[in-house]
Image (cartoon, rainbow, N blue to C red):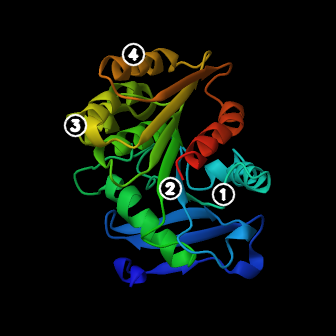
Amino acid sequence: MLRRMFKTVEISDPRFAFEGLRFVTVHSPALGQRVDLTLFVPESAAGRRDLPIVLLLHGVYGSHWAWALKGGAHRTAARLIAAGELPPVVLAMPSDGLWSDGSGYVPHATQNFERWIVEEVPAATHAAVPETSAASPLFVAGLSMGGFGALRLGGKYPRRFKAVSGHSSATHKDQFKQLVGDRLRDWSDAEDDRCVLHALRCNRAQLPAIRFDCGTEDFLIEPNRALHRGLTESGIEHCYEEFSGAHTWGYWENHLRDSLRFFAQHL
């Protein structure tokens, strides 16, 4: 039934899997093209049902392999699971759709990158990992552009996610001007697609659990502090943390564990 959502589904052969990673390519109705997804499935998943799914969203210039092969996300999850700090979960690490230098995970005029993440990535995960289902608890985290996506989607789809987390997050569409350039005009200009604070305020009565962090040497530290102040002034419960560090993979590799531990608290 799940495969019917996609025109085609290609899943890597488990004989050639390494460190629990699987690779999936589907033809996305939301995007009208093929798109990729990296999954991490721990050994302890075997025989379980309705395993939680954690979506990890990458930043500009990246793709589906970045969280695993630049940030070691699967190794971090495996360590936490082995230590009993995190129950078995599946990591779903999708491409943003590979539009220009970054899609923003927002709707565009002819492609809906938001729908790809919210609807199709979980469905593709179900197709590739039978231990997951529509009943699987769903979480989303991301870095930079992915943090913008994770926090904003938590605001727009509060009933879809149990908790959301952002690392070094962009908080407003305007912050991408130097990164994406003139192509930014193709992103949706709706206010809840432009502004994380607006998206979170719109559904403040039913939001998932929220956390985000930023490095004190990160160029996005002031926007993150402003988001923290805005949420506090709006009476929206959240966890905000600052750590030493910049806008680097070393920072994200080190602090993904904070998101995963936060998610474990909400299972």
Spatial separation of the CA atoms under disc 3 and disc 1: 39 Å
Q: For the residue marked with disc 2, what is the amino acid? A: Ser
Q: Which mark is residue 95?
A: 2
x 22%, y 51%: residue: 109
Q: For the residue marked with disc 3, what is the amino acid? A: Asp
For marks 3 and 4 on the same chain, the one whose residue lies earlier in the sequence: 3
Q: Secondary structure at mark 3?
A: loop
Label 2 with label 1: CB-CB less than 8 Å: no
Q: Nearer the viewer, residue 234 or 63?
A: 234
Spatial separation of the CA atoms under disc 2 and disc 1: 25 Å
Q: For the residue marked with disc 1, what is the amino acid? A: Pro
Bin the neighbour count of mark 3 within 10 Å (Cα to Cα): few under 14, some 14-19, many 20 and up.
some
Label 3 with label 1: CB-CB less than 8 Å: no
110 over 198 or under it: above or below: below
| Foreground disc of the pair 1, 4 | 1
Q: For the residue marked with disc 4, what is the amino acid? A: Arg
Spatial separation of the CA atoms under disc 2 and disc 3: 22 Å
134 over 15 or under it: above or below: above
Bin the neighbour count of mark 1 within 10 Å (Cα to Cα): few under 14, some 14-19, many 20 and up.
many
Identify residue for label 1: 87
